[in-house]
Image: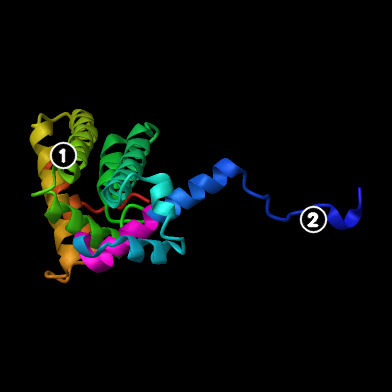
Amino acid sequence: MNPNFRRREGAPRRRSREENREFRRLSLLRAAIQTVARHDIQGATVERICDAAGASRGLIAHYFDSKEALLLAALEDWYRESIAIKSAIAADTEQPAETRLRLVARSSFAPPTYSWEMAAAWQAFTNASRHHPEFARPIRRTSRKVTTIVEALFDEAARDRGIAIDAKECALGLYILDDGLWNSLATGKDRLTRKSAQALCDRHIDGCLGIASHAGTPQ
């Protein structure tokens, strides 16, 4: 073999055809979120999405049946990632249930789940869901999954403390709080920060578990 054609040690491996296909698909999903964040649902045109992705305008048709299908896939992909992160935290039984509960709540306001673009896009999708059931369905489905994860952690944390609580109501309250905090972050109307949003979630958890003041901060 000619040494000039030998792959250098440490040089990046060329992506396979399937890896390239997935890379282009994910690029379109990320570009869709960015475009919705900047231009809302109606302004998220094929041209703008492709410009953000650095792709030809025909690429969307190669992966998705329509612009609407791409937007829905982008929303569902973000929700899948968010649920996967929360599920992994909840499953780490080496941590006490209360710690996992707080970390699950805080994950909603930390990368990769949270970014300014995602908050703005989420607000646009939420507004559009009132008139477009295709967006409403994944939002409702995610709500059920998150509250199920959090309810189980509330129940376990209460048992660890030897107290009785309505874990379902506590989980629903935390989800509603989370929703409102995202709205505040997306609009900027309350000058809320990610850290203060996380602190407010901690206070809700404290109240549900009968803790006067929470001093510890899980790392």
Q: Are there few (<14), some (14-19), or many (20+) residues within 10 Å of tag 2?
A: few
Q: Residue at x 21, y 59 (%)?
A: 41
Residue 203 visible here: no
How many numbered marks are there?
Answer: 2
Nearest to the observer: residue 199 or residue 145: 145
Give the image location of residue 163, x and y in percent: 13, 30
Callout 1: helix, strand or loop? helix
Q: Residue at x 16, y 71 (%)?
A: 191
At label 1, the amino acid type is Arg
Quick check: is 30 in the magenta stretch? yes
Instruction: Please provide the residue range marked out in magenta.
Output: 29-41
- Provide the major secondary structure of the magenta segment: helix
Q: How is the image coloured?
A: rainbow
Say whether residue 94 is left or right of residue 199.
Answer: right
Q: Are there few (<14), some (14-19), or many (20+) residues within 10 Å of tag 1?
A: few
- Residue 8's disc is 2
Question: Which residue is the extreme one toward the right?
Answer: 2
At label 2, the amino acid type is Arg
Give the image location of residue 196, x and y in percent: 21, 62
Q: Is residue 120 above or below residue 68?
A: below
Q: Is residue 16 above or below residue 125?
A: above
Say whether residue 156 is left or right of residue 176.
Answer: right
Q: Residue at x 46, y 64 (%)?
A: 54
Q: Residue at label 1?
A: 140
